[in-house]
Amino acid sequence: MNKKTNKKRIGFFLIGLYEGGGENVILDLAKGFAEDGFDVDLLLFSRKGVLEKRIDLQINIIDLNVSRILFSILPIIKYLRKEKPVFVLGTSEHANLILILAKIFSRTKTKVFVRVGMTFSDLFKNYKNKRDKLIPFLIKVLYPKADVIIANSKNVADDLIKTSKISKDKIKVIYNPKFIEEIKEKSKKGEWLYPKKFTILAIGRLEKQKDFKTLIRTFALVKQKTDAQLIILGEGGQQKELEKLVLDLNIKDVYLEGFTDNPYFYMANSDVLVSTSLWEGFSNVLIEAGILGLPIIATDCGSGSRELLAPNSDFNKQLKKGKIEYAEYGVLAAKQDVENIAGVILKLYQNKELLKKYGQKSQRRSQIFEIKEIIKEYKIYEFSNY
């Protein structure tokens, strides 16, 4: 399957290569470990998706070539027995459960690391069909059998303990990694084709979780007060609904630009990043915006936004409508609070010093996410007894 070397081998498992925070984290980790001297395998249920071109050339792609996700277990068992990687890591509920089962049946010494990038209490609420409703039960039974459970924020870890009754000793918090210098270089490449006016940027899948409907309604209020523009990067199932909302509200200067493999250029040329998510784990977009010194306004959605922007606050706190928090590294607002989010945007537009201050602070905060530092944290558990 793979050419044998004297390097340590590790594996990562993804269901697909669609746009998503967890998928991007895995691809960054895979590249980072390859650069650190490991042989790295990327096991794929499906090669479909916009992220295929993000796979680093040093990474060995293994197509599992099965028709259903559950059938991935057998080829992964064969992989574990033959290649004997030091560890394998997954990042979605389905991938994690399959890796744990494959480890059990393979009876190998390979460690299984499962990454959790979302608060399960929020995720489980959106499970509709009978098959998905079985997932919480399987997580409670199988996740404790993983060698390490990696939460991408302290709040995700706390939520995992509460919802799945998993011992806190099994869970380790490791933040999402970023190639900081690479992001800065990419941010310089592109051509700005928009008017030169105050630019609000938002990035993410066009799905319920990101609540772009609230953002568009917010922008409608902002537009009544100043000549601004809104750029939304991402694709997803709500595309037509969002386009209709823009038409119904009769708003100009809203650009739904779809997916781009270089959002950093947009970040470098925008004035403020706004996240209106209903729930999050630890947002890659907020970290990347900070790297490029982009001021951040984010909804206090019960997880990573507070941990990132107000790291010394109570992470169990969540703002109610009508409340705004001018935190240390950005501004927090209540979910779906259209009027107050619009008010914050207008305040930053009018107060250039405050806008500049938040840009500088978010950039300082971002330094802790450098890929080399994050990989050191993973390597602590490489030969641990967890």
Image (cartoon, grey):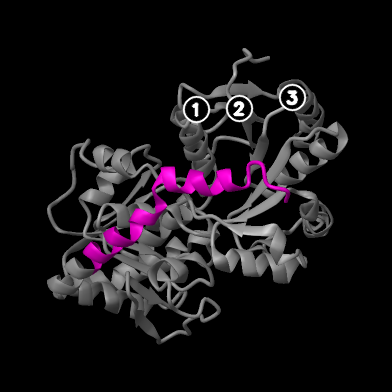
Closest to the observer: 71 or 386? 386
Q: Report crowding for label 1: few under 14, some 14 to 19, many 20 or more residues within 10 A (C-alpha).
A: few
Q: Are marks 2 and 3 in contact (CB under 8 Å)?
A: no
Residue pictured at 20% horizontal, 69% vertical: 357
Q: Relative to 30, is 267 on the left or the right? A: left
Q: Which residue is mark 2?
A: 8
Q: Relative to 190, is 303 on the left or the right? A: right
Provide residue 81's location: percent of width, then percent of height: 79, 25
Task: Classify 53 as above or below 188.
Answer: above
Q: Main secondary structure of the magenta part?
A: helix
* Mark toward the start of the polypeptide (2 vs 1): 2
Q: Which residue is mark 1?
A: 37
Q: Are marks 2 and 1 in contact (CB under 8 Å)?
A: yes
Q: Is residue 86 magenta?
A: no
- Give residue 79's mark: 3
Q: Report crowding for label 3: few under 14, some 14 to 19, many 20 or more residues within 10 A (C-alpha).
A: many
Residue pictured at 26% horizontal, 52% vertical: 292
What stretch of residues is rendered in magenta?
A: 358-386
**Cα distance in 3D space between marks 2 and 1:** 8 Å
Which secondary structure lies at badge 2?
loop
The residue under label 1 is which amino acid type? Gly
